Image: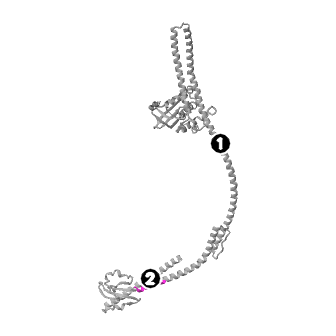
Amino acid sequence: MAITSLALLLTSGLSLFNQIDNTEQLLKSDVITASQIIGIAYAEQMQSGDVIELSNYQNLPGSIPVKIIHLYDAALQPVAQFTNLSRSPVGDMSERKEELENPVITDTYIEVMTPVLIERDIVGYSYVRASTEQLEALISDAIIIAVVVLLLMLVLCFLLVMRLQERVTRPIENLVNLSQRVAKQKDYSARAVPTGITELNKLADGINVMLERMQDYMLGQEQAEEEHRKLNASLEEKVNQRTLALKEANQELIQTLEKLHQFQRQMVQNEKMASLGDMVAGVAHEVNTPIGLGVTASTMMLDRLKSLDQEFQNKSLKASTLSKFINEGQENLNIIYRNLNRAAELISSFKQVAVDQSSEGNRTFSFAKLMDEILLSLRPRLKKVQHDVNVHCDENLFIETKAGPINQIMINLIMNSVIHGFENIEHGQIDIYVEMIGDNKLNIVYKDNGVGIPEHLRKRIFDPFVTTKRGQGGSGLGMHLVYNLVTQALNGSISITSEEGAGVEFQIIFPVRRVAPDLVAKSS
């Protein structure tokens, strides 16, 4: 209906436009003809001298009603005029000569001014104004006819559309209802009924084929779902069995892992006790020497004293003998004092190291003195080799932290260098640099000039049971113990830099509290 209405509007509009245009052209032609006829009569009057009666030219050929006529001479001066209007006549039109050379149409009239010729010479001008009532009436009639025809065509079109709609849409509605019923009820056994329209029959056949295939597909899907349900039930049973077995295996694995952790902790503890045992053995050997010298000196003093007592009892004591005894006694007492003092220092250092290793509490100490105690406890092992250990630390550096972990860390690092780093090296060197970073962190840089660590071993140096002395007494827990002490006991970090053949460097950083030396002296 919209397309038909648009087409009818366009055709009616074009037809109406053509009729109006043709009527306007005809009206222009008639007014020009009327003006030329009046001009010819005006020329004849000028030649014959008769008086022209303009009222005789009201109705000219073409039935154009002339309302106003003006005649002008060649100089555009008014000569005569005629008015068939109830109102006052119009004024002079000579000023509009150029505008009125072609007909001008307004809402109510049409006007034109044509030249009057005698033998091709312009002797005057003729102005004619005619009514456009016929044009308006024609336009009105044409519009009415066009509207009536348009309405009749629309009504006819509407009736045809309704007829066609009933014939076409009813089968389409049946197909729509069928598709909706199938979508809601999932009844793929329904089929479309043939119609009297070929195209709709093809559509119905396509829908029936689709429904048939969908029905076959749904039957296959139901069978597949049934098989899938059976398979799922079987799989669930298998999954439950495997889950139960996995739980049992996980429980066994957890127990095994717990035992492994206990074994690892026991191995670490054994490593610490072994280190302490080696220290005890070394210190005992070191203490035996000064004690033995003291025992020898005291025995000599007893023998000399016994001899002196006999001579005194026999009254044969000489002044020279007494003087010699006094000199030997002073010398022997000095020997006894020095060796007992040395033994006391060894025992005190060993006691402090042992206490530090077994204690996890904080204490205030001089780091340089702590290193002296550590090196003194390691002297039985270090005096067997020709390696140098240099400690670069400020004597006035007093800190408050856990001394035990530091003790164990330094002992493990030094013994690791002695056993592994200086293997096949007669004279090695160890440098330990200690300094504060800011006010609350201690930086320890440990270096040796040993054989270094290969890359494949350096990546796993802090892992447990990593050693190059497997089967030769090495447990592989020394560096693992160092890592745990630094990161857990001291809340710090440790990094390693090493290349094979270029020694090793450890950097240990952990938080401490620095204490002024005068405060330590006051507390002491």
* Image mark for residue 255: 1
Instruction: Give, as a three-letter code, the residue at label 1.
Output: Gln
Q: Residue at x 63, y 41 (%)?
A: 258
Q: In the displayed structure, would residue 141 be above or below residue 204? A: below
Report the magenta residues as a range.
Answer: 132-145
Q: Nearer the viewer, mark 1 or mark 2?
A: 1
Q: Can see residue 451? A: no
Q: Name the one closer to the observer, 309 or 320.
A: 309
Dot 1 or dot 2, earlier in sequence? 2
Q: Between residues 107 and 155, which one lies in front from this camera angle?
A: 155
How many neighbours does mark 2 have within 10 angstroms: few (below 14), some (14-19), or many (20 or more)?
A: some
**Residue that carries the numbered disc 2 in the rendered image:** 20
Tell me, for residue 302, which label it has, or none.
Answer: none
Could you tell me residue 307's position as x and y percent? 56, 11
Nearer to me, 19 or 419: 419
Label 1 Cα crowd, 10 Å radius (few <14 / some 14-19 / many 20+): few
By secondary structure, the bulk of the magenta-drawn segment is best described as helix
Query: Is 136 one of the magenta-colored residues?
Result: yes
For residue 263, say whether it is visible: yes
- Figure quadrant of residue 161: bottom right
Instruction: Give the percent coordinates (x, y) of residue 136.
Output: 42, 84
Rendered residue at 56%/17% (across/down)? 298
- Image spot of residue 125 (x, y percent): 33, 85
Residue 413 location, quadrant: top right
Q: How many marks?
A: 2
Q: Nearer the viewer, residue 85 or 74?
A: 85
Is disc 1 placed on a helix, strand or loop? helix
Left or right, 167 with reference to 119:
right
What amino acid is labelled 2 in the image?
A: Ile
For marks 1 and 2, give the CA distance. 109 Å
Residue 387 on the magenta span: no
